[in-house]
């Protein structure tokens, strides 16, 4: 029996080039000044809700629409997950963060006085 490791797999160089190109393009897009959107995201953090609800949304789409393609599922989730993230931010997370003021401050382990 012969074990095949991932390192032995033949990868098409064009696939690697495309992946590197997409990575570079996304990095450059991230560096763009986003104007009003950038100012909006300084006060609204939908990232956790988007992360949290993205997978269930994709799975729900697959159950609700069994014949949906992977591409259509991805684009629908790219629209719906940030909306769920915003709903989570406004309805749950901002209110939960207000409870931080009720807790005693934790000591800073790095600058602790001995």
Image (spheres, rainbow, N blue to C red):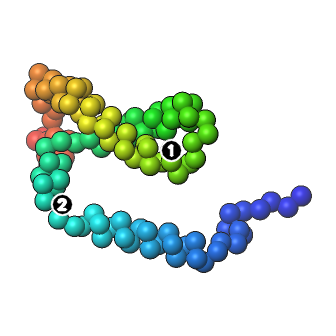
**Label 2 belongs to which residue?**
34
- Number of numbered callouts drawn: 2
Q: Residue at x 37, y 39 (%)?
A: 80
Q: Is residue 100 left or right of residue 47?
A: left
Q: Residue furthest right?
A: 1
- Residue 101 appears in the picture as rendered: yes
From the image, which quarter does the N terminus lie in? bottom right
| Quadrant of res 22 | bottom left
Between 63 and 105, the one lying in front of the other is 63
Q: Describe the element under mark 1 as helix, strand or loop.
A: helix
Image vertical order of residue 87 relative to residue 40, above or below:
above
- Residue 48 appears in the picture as rendered: no
Q: Is residue 9 left or right of residue 71?
A: right
Crowd tier of the residue under label 1, counting other residues whose Cα lies within 10 Å: few below 14, some 14–19, many 20 or above:
some
Q: Residue at x 57, y 42 (%)?
A: 68
Between 14 and 75, the one lying in front of the other is 75
Q: Position of residue 107 (x, y in %)?
A: 15, 35
Q: Which disc, if any, is residue 98?
A: none
Between 23 and 70, the one lying in front of the other is 70
| Quadrant of res 2 | bottom right
Q: Nearer the viewer, mark 2 or mark 1?
A: 1
Among numbered discs 2 and 1, the one appearing first in the sequence:
2
Image vertical order of residue 37 relative to residue 17, above or below:
above
**Label 1 belongs to which residue?**
73
Q: Residue at x 36, y 44 (%)?
A: 79
Q: Position of residue 63 (x, y in %)?
A: 57, 31
From the image, which quarter does the C terminus lie in? top left
Crowd tier of the residue under label 2, counting other residues whose Cα lies within 10 Å: few below 14, some 14–19, many 20 or above:
few
Q: Describe the element under mark 2 as helix, strand or loop.
A: loop
Q: Position of residue 18 (x, y in %)?
A: 51, 72
Instruction: Determine the CA span between mark 2 and mark 1.
Output: 27 Å
Q: Residue at x 16, y 55 (%)?
A: 38
């Amino acid at each position: 029996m012969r074990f095949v490791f991932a390192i032995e797999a033949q990868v098409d160089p064009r696939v690697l080039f495309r992946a590197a190109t997409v990575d570079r393009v996304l990095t450059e897009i991230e560096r763009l000044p986003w104007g009003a959107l950038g100012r909006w995201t300084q006060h609204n953090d939908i990232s956790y809700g988007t992360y949290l609800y993205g997978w269930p949304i994709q799975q729900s789409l697959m159950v609700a629409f069994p014949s949906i393609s992977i591409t259509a599922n991805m684009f629908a989730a790219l629209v719906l997950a940030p909306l769920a993230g915003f709903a989570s931010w406004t309805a749950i997370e901002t209110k939960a963060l207000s409870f931080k003021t009720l807790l005693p401050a934790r000591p800073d382990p790095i600058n602790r006085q001995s």
